Image (cartoon, grey):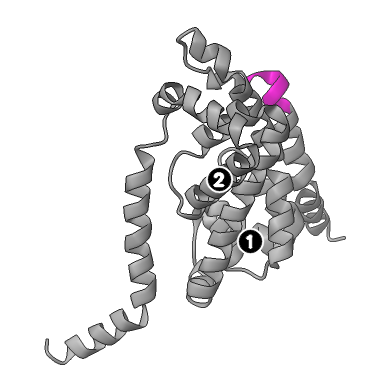
Amino acid sequence: MRALLPSVFRLVGHYRVAILLLVFVVSVSYFLQGYLSFDNLREHRAILTEFRDANYLVAVVVFILVYTLFVAFSVPGGLVLSLTGGFLFATFPGVFYNMVGATLGASAIFLAARWGFGANLAATLENSEGLVKRIKDGVDENQWSMLFLIRLVPGVPFFLANLVPSFLDVPLRRFVISTFLGIFPGALVFTSIGAGLGDIFERGQTPDLAVVWEPQIILPILGLCLLSALPLLMKLVRGKKGL
């Protein structure tokens, strides 16, 4: 046991920055999560709109910064933030502010993971299974198509779409562009819902998020998913035909 302790201490010392960062992220996530809810937005909507009207540019910068931090620390609540962006800044330019905040936060995760854990986790992903393995293989085959696809498909968690490319040979510029453009359809839907929150709050109601599954909304998104996956499907078909 005594012979093992020095090795353990060396291991902890080697990863002490990562361990401290993990503890910090968990603490911040737990603290901030309680402040982000529809009830709090309804209760403080007058204060928020008054501050926005009196300090528009400051409100924009603060909102983007908050969105960036929430995404960077993977704090649950991105949906409420997207609705808040629409509530405060309307559909346009609110959708742009939402996309900037989400992209900056995603890029922060991408860079932190690449600098801190990239080499070790890249080897782990080679032997992984399930959804992570399929994303990894897809990115290896066609980076642009897969990067857009994992942003468009609703079933892929946002944090997973941020992490997996960081462990592969994906340039930062490509990651940023695919993230910003890939999240546009979903961001537009939720920002537009948020733009109508004022009337919903006045009636004492809660926004109906099930609207995203309406055919006129979900079908175009699925069409974009198919378009993004088309190069991968074509490559698969050609491979089977021996072309």
Residue type at the position of mark 1:
Asp
Distance of label 1 from label 2 (alpha carbons) = 38 Å
Looking at the rendered image, the quarter that the N terminus falls into is bottom left
- Give, as a single range, the part of the protein colored magenta: 213-219
In this orientation, which residue lies closer to the viewer: 165 or 231? 165
Left or right: 89 as drawn, with respect to 65: right
Q: Position of residue 208 (x, y in %)?
A: 53, 17
Earlier along the polypeptide chain: callout 1 or callout 2? Answer: 2
Q: Position of residue 132 (x, y in %)?
A: 53, 56
Residue positioned most to the bottom:
3
Residue type at the position of mark 2:
Val
**Labels 1, 2: front one:** 2
> Is residue 121 within the magenta segment?
no
| For the residues bearing labels 1 and 2, Cβ distance under 8 angstroms | no
Q: What residue is at 72 percent from the left and 26 percent from the top?
A: 219
In the image, residue 108 sits, relative to residue 79, either above or below, namely: below
Looking at the rendered image, the quarter that the C terminus falls into is bottom right
Numbered disc 1: secondary structure: helix
Q: What residue is at 58 percent from the left and 40 percent from the top?
A: 59
In this orientation, which residue lies closer to the viewer: 231 or 200? 200
Q: Is residue 179 visible?
A: yes
Q: Position of residue 101 (x, y in %)?
A: 61, 47
- As drawn, the label of residue 137 is 1
Q: What residue is at 83 percent from the left and 55 percent from the top?
A: 238
Dominant SS type (magenta): helix
In the image, residue 172 sits, relative to residue 29, either above or below, namely: below
Dot 1 alpha-carbon crowd within 10 angstroms: few under 14, some 14 to 19, many 20 or more: some
